Image (tube, coloured by chain):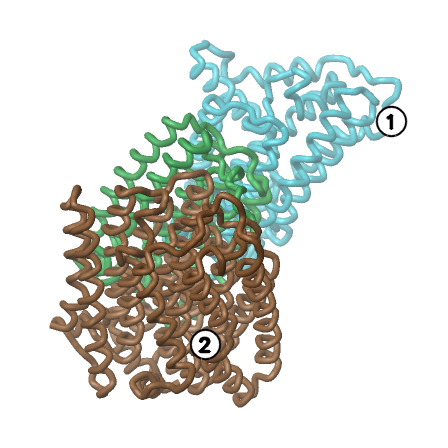
Amino acid sequence: MQGVFAQVAVLGSSGVLLCGIILLWRRGVAAYITAFAWQSTVLAALTAAVGYFGADPQLYVVAALLFGIKAVAMPRLLRRVARRFAAGREPDPYVNTATSLVVSGLLVLLAYAAARPLEAIADVPTRAGMPLAMGLMFVSLFVIISRKMAITQVIGFLMLENAIALLAVLGTYGVPLIVELGVFLDALMGFLVMQIFLYDIHDTFSTVDVDVLTRLKH
Amino acid sequence: MLLTGLLVPWMLSAALSSVLRRSHRLAAWLTAAAGVASAASATRLWLNALRGEATVVGSGALFRVDGLSALIACCIAAVAGLAMLPGSGIEKSDAGPDGARRFRIFGSLFALAMLVAVTINNVALMWVAIEATTIVSALLIPLHRSKASIEASWKYILIGSVGIALAFAGTVLAYFDFVSLLGRRQDALNWTLLMHVAPSLHADVLRLAFVFLLVGYGTKAGLAPMHTWLPDAHSEAPAPLSAMMSGVLLAVAQYAIIRWKAVVDAAGGPAFTNQVLMALALVSIAIGALSLVRQQSYKRLLAYSSVEHSGLICLGLTFGPAGVFASLLHLLNHALAKSVSFLLAGRILARYRSADVERVSGLMRVMPGTGALFAAGLLALMGLPPFGLFVSEFLLFRAGFMSGHVVATSAALVLAGVGFVGLAGHLMQMLYGAAPDGVAKGERAWWGLAPLAVPLLAMVVMGLFLPGAVGRLLGRIVEAMSI
Amino acid sequence: MEKPLFDVVGIAVEIGQALLALALAPALVGFIRWMKARMQNRRGAPVWQPYAELRKLFGKDILVSQNASWVFHVAPYVVFGSTVVVSLIVPILVTPLPFNAVADLFAVVYLLLLGTVFLALAGLDPGSAFGGMGSSREMTIAAISEPAIALAILSLALAAGSTNLGEIAARTIARPSSALSPGHILAFVALFIVMLAETGRLPVDNPATHLELTMIHEAMILEYSGPYLALVEWASWLKLLVFLMLAGNLFVPWGLATSLAPAALAIAFATTVAKLVVLAAAVAVLETRVAKLRLFRVPELLAVSFVLGLLAVASSFSVR
């Protein structure tokens, strides 16, 4: 049983990470939103699986919230924003595609190195997936700093949150429920505020390319 | 009871401001009253902490106000109260009465979130509160909509949220360490429990966690190289908001860093955290001081000064107990000086209608009262006697030399000197010279100026002789940290 | 690991396996073409059409350009020979093979690369514009796919503890649950993408095109005719079969015979055909659904394969 649990955990984490890497490969905003929706779905499924194998019914609630908010509601809102701004494709990013992919591979290796102390002390069956969660964290950070469209940066940030939630689920079978609820609330509010700003940026600048946000220097 | 007096007034002020749409004056006075009530409770909490007892409220010790919490809670209450006073100039700014009402609502929530962050015992809930401060303040920055303010608030919310997310990652890692040792407990994330079990936690996992926590909370504290949101946000935000952000929001982030440093040091010794913190602190001081020399906007000037002082505070934390004492004193004084300076900058902006240093001249002639107080504020920030910042910087550098970090302390000293020159140059340019055309002369609304003189007086008092109430409290905090 | 069978029966099985691969390769390609035609609502040529093509070509004259050198004449034999040698060492029916001692995964890859290099040289040799263009494109793709394939192999080797093909297959048979490990799956996907690049299938290269803009493999062999063309075409079909068998038998090795009993061989034959059909169908479906990538996007696809290989290596490494 433990073997199956470990396999499921690692498979799920790999799926979550791969959805994140898709952000570096494809260029269309619609593809990004779909990748994020799939990532959140896999994460919710993995959370439910951990709740089942780890005998912690609170995680079912968390999985349901994850699915409802991050796999359904947020992509819907994002699609509405993207449609409204007719933002089809990401303009040439600061780092080209092939290099970004190679960099992301190296970042995952870095995450494996950084997560050695974690794996050394962990005795949960899900520990093999923790380096993948850290890898997704680094990849999301890379997405945020190397992409030019504001909406891509928002999606990168949402993936960063997914990565940390994955880390919490794998390492400690989730954080206490009250903390989880607080985090969800914060994530939702933060996302809504970012949405407001996306509209504001578009209204004020007539584009969502953050390359033009260069008025304030030094 | 005391905690209710600290937090509830802000809740009421936010609620009432959103309900009272027409009666602006009434709402303004209610907000001011809330500030006073909160400050009074904060003072009582301070007195409690002086006696050595921590105020504990709530089941499972949900809220716990010990010395450090009381110190920063007082700063928050005082600065927020000052910023929300009716005379702070928010009505005269371009935002209009509607903007003023929005400011009162969200500003109260902002103060509430900050107070919750420093008084709550649970590490993760503290994180939730700090994230809430980011969201609320981001809504307030573009109070007056323009391209620059939208850009500033976008940078703020993106960089701030990313930083905060990393801080949460660090929290999760620390929780993971705890759980792998002691299993999952309901109160696992309480500061008291963490400090208690810290010696038996795994040092290398906590070090990894500390890196994330430092980068995350350091972003909110204005440490370089994550500080890039600071100058933009402060230059575009309305002055009272800048006062609250620079004065006390940075202090709340520094509070988080101090608490976590204590936990990680208890686990594996202070060597690693000192190195990392010192590196970031020195870079912050360097960037802050060097940017002060060539600045064109006086609001950005104050913002970079915040970066520099934030670096100094964090540097002091690495110098042992004497350094921590100096850092806390510096934190207190900086909160007072920076908030007053920003509020005065708001008055200057309202009169001169320009944020450029070159356009502002002859301050002593145009607004003598504001000019004098602004000069006092900037002199304080430069670290001159008789203000309290001189004493705290002196203690800081002395602690640095005595603890053996000669190179770092000398570098910081030189950079502080550079910052001094930068600030002094711009101050002279603003104070003297001919007043530009089109600017009305003469001080107006003296009554709005009077409350701003109080913090400056308090700093003079602390600079001349450290009152027992302050000194003893700081001593108790250093003891409790047992670094 | 069982003792290798160094006797006449073993060698006979080896040669029989290679002959079987040679015989099945045209049928495989015919099947893929037939499936694509059916999916495009055409009737399509029958599955044994490639056999007819080979017979036709072997009967024709060879026409050689005046500018061609010995490379042009030697290349078809080298390509064909290297691919046949590879088919001798890849486990198609039986594992471990009598030649198992040299059945190293790196040997397989670099034998195939030998064929590719000679084909590229043969494209340049006659001095025609199309040939040179095809050769340069082919070498670009080969250069970028080498790291990717090396990483995919490395991850398999790490999991099995050796680069020997027989070992790898034996390890996976011994531990069925490792077939679902992410290292395994990622390496499979990485290898599949590289296979598409190396064997000239869509979305990297269209095997049915003769447009200047889209040819890669076809451009290199444009000058060939008669038996030379037959050898080169047969070699490329055999390469496809070998890659598919690699993918199938390294990742899903059940069904491989571990002894020479006739019953085991019969089962192995049946499962081989089944795996070929499934993988060929997958290739056909993919080719029908996906459009050809523009040439400068191919490095991006291979970079994805490289990253997947990297992840597979990291994952296998951490499991040990």
What's the distance in space between the residues labelled 1 and 2, CA to CA?
87 Å
**Amino acid on which the number 1 mark rests in the picture:** Ser
Quarter assignment of residue B369 = bottom left
Quadrant in which the N terminus of chain A is drawn: bottom left
Give residue B256's position: percent from left, percent from top.
35, 69
Q: Which residue is mark 1?
A: C69
* Colour green, chain: A
Label 2 amino acid? Leu
Is residue B57 found left or right of B142 in the rendered image? left
Q: Which chain is brown?
A: B
Would residue C273 be found to the left or right of residue B55 on screen? right
Residue B54 point in image, percent of width and height: 21, 81
Determine whether, in the image, residue C107 is placed left or right of residue A112: right
Q: Residue at x 47, y 59 (%)?
A: B303
Regarding mark 1 in the picture, which secondary structure is present there? loop
Q: Colour of chain C?
A: cyan
